[in-house]
Image (spheres, rainbow, N blue to C red):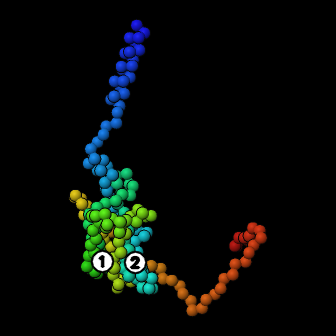
Amino acid sequence: MVRRLVGVIALAVLAGGCGSQPEWHSGHRHQEMFAPTAMRIHPVFTQVRDWTNDGRPDGIEVLVEFQDRFGDPVKASGQALFEVYAFRQGSPDPRGARLVEPFVANIDNVASQRDHWNRTSRCYSFQLAWPVVRQNEAYVLTASFQLEGGGRFTDQLVLKPMAKEIRSEHTEQFIPVPTTGPVESTPEP
């Protein structure tokens, strides 16, 4: 009787364990789970830049980030289209006249993925060469991305003027004074 009871329990455990095996999904469903669902122009790192270090801006460096359904950065494959417009202050649509022909970039093969992917920022980096860009003007940058296999993302960012550097005609030398103990401060009245 005990053997029979142990046998029934063992059979129930084995049968119950069979139903809890992980369900393997097709590769397509797995890819969908981690596919891009959103795109943004990175607002901090996208700026007018001087990438030749000659003291003059060369264009706009754009960092584009894609996110999956969990909000994590992911890679994407397709074609990006960037447009630059004059900025219209106080308008519901801040885009004024288009200032330059659209920039087109493909990231649809291994070489272009390597060229544009930035491992540190986990974004794609694009250098939009535009030698007449000015750091003291505001622009509206738009990005459209056509995913390979279907789907489209768009985003827009107002690029604000960079703060002007304050330069003096003379140079003052600052020599730090070493302290041996804590520095005390007195509150201002």
- Is residue 7 found left or right of 166 in the rendered image? left
- Is residue 167 found left or right of 45 in the rendered image? right
Q: Where is residue 31? Give x, y as percent.
A: 30, 50
| Identity, as a three-letter code, of the amino acid under mark 2 | Val
How many dots with numbers? 2
- Disc with the residue nearer the chain's start (1 vs 2): 2
**Label 2 packing within 10 angstroms: few (<14), some (14-19), many (20+):** many
Work out which quarter of the rendered image holds the C terminus and state it: bottom right
Secondary element at image label 2: strand
Q: Residue at label 2?
A: 48
Residue at the location (25% across, 79% down)? 101
Q: Residue at label 1?
A: 85
- Name, please, the residue furthest toward the right: 180
Residue at the location (22% across, 58% down)? 150
Q: Where is residue 179? Give x, y as percent.
A: 75, 72
Residue at the location (33% across, 81% down)? 130
Dot label at residue 128: none
Q: Nearer the viewer, mark 1 or mark 2?
A: 2
Observer-nearest of 188 and 74? 74
| Contact? badges 1 and 2 (CB < 8 Å) | no
